[in-house]
Image (spheres, grey):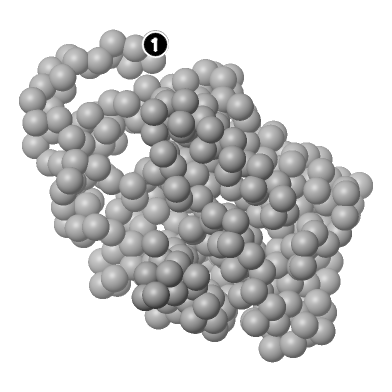
Amino acid sequence: MPIEFIGSLVNGSAANFRPGGYDSDYPARMARLHEEAGFDRLLVGHSASSPDGLTVADTVLNATTRLGVLLAHRPGFVAPTVAARQYATLDAFHPGRVAMHIISGGDDADQARDGDFADKAARYRRSDEFLDIVKREWSAATPFDYDGEFYRVKGALSAVRPEGGALPVYFAGASADAVLVGGRQADVYAFWGEPLAAIKERIAAVRKSAEQAGRTINRFSVSTRPIAAATEEAAWERAHRILDAEMAKGGGAATFKARGSLGSQRLADFADQAEVHDKRLWTPLAKTPTAGGNATALVGSYEQIAEALLDYVAIGVTTLLIRGYDPEADAADYATIIKLVRQQDPTLAAVSG
């Protein structure tokens, strides 16, 4: 299975707004940049303040010919039968280019902005039921009923279904509840950029969960924010400029507070242990005032970052989600890293051998 590269639109960030409102040209512009750089998919993220993801994803797909989307969805606000038809309809217009990324919600405050006050355990149980129904809506050729804790449907049946009866489902979460549900439902399980040893442990935990559910999961994603330059020295100079800028956004180190999600706290804990893990996983950005979950960086020359990414591949990672601190410039610049990684992709070598 070739390595999959996913970029990030960071839908709703300051990057895609301009004076007067949303920069409607931004999604198409970013989509073309990522397609030209060699990415396979573009993540269309979600938050309680983001522009509508379905509309943005459709814009991305219409602006490109090959690039796929990984469209984030937060269960609890749209009926699963409706969401299933929305994704299947998008796929019908852009066959084979649509995947669903389930975010159960790690930030209580962001959930509350949309009126959801369920606790984290309940949100994961809800995601489990949601995916049960979505998958049946995608695959069922005859009406079906469902009666669960969160959802009840009677005679559900969709006139639009993806070819093969399924779309890829990506899933994430660091808690035991997340791993339990992900083992039952995920096609690809996603992790933040943790040290290699920690990723190995997490892959093993997800595989065990899947095995207990009578399934096998062989696809895993790691998200990092590479800081690259022609030389290692130049990359480190840039990394420290970025760190200073991120610290300044929140007024300095004293304002840091660990984010609500366990995943964000794990990254902060790794930052407490060491600034650099493995060859070049740089962690101080995980403790900046504005840090979110995707807040560890690989720092080095293009060749060094490609080597570090391949180290993740060597332990079982199949998807590399990378985004930079200068979204447009970095998306184009990552073409060099993608090319270097693909030239050394061990999965392709195994196939050709």
Q: Residues within 10 Å of mark 1 (few under 14, many from 20)?
A: few
The x, y position of residue 240, in whole percent, is: 83, 71
Q: Which residue is drawn at 43% across and 22% down?
A: 126
Q: Residue at x 39, y 28 (%)?
A: 214
Q: What element carries label 1?
A: loop
Q: Is residue 64 above or below residue 218?
A: below
Q: Quadrant of residue 29?
A: bottom left
Q: Which residue is drawn at 20% across and 58% down?
A: 95
Q: Name the residue under label 1.
A: 149
- Amino acid at dot 1: Glu
* Badge count: 1
Q: Which quadrant: the N terminus?
A: bottom left
Q: Which quadrant: the C terminus?
A: bottom left
Determine whether, in the image, residue 314 is placed left or right of residue 137.
right
Determine whether, in the image, residue 161 is placed left or right of residue 32.
left
The x, y position of residue 171, in whole percent, is: 47, 41
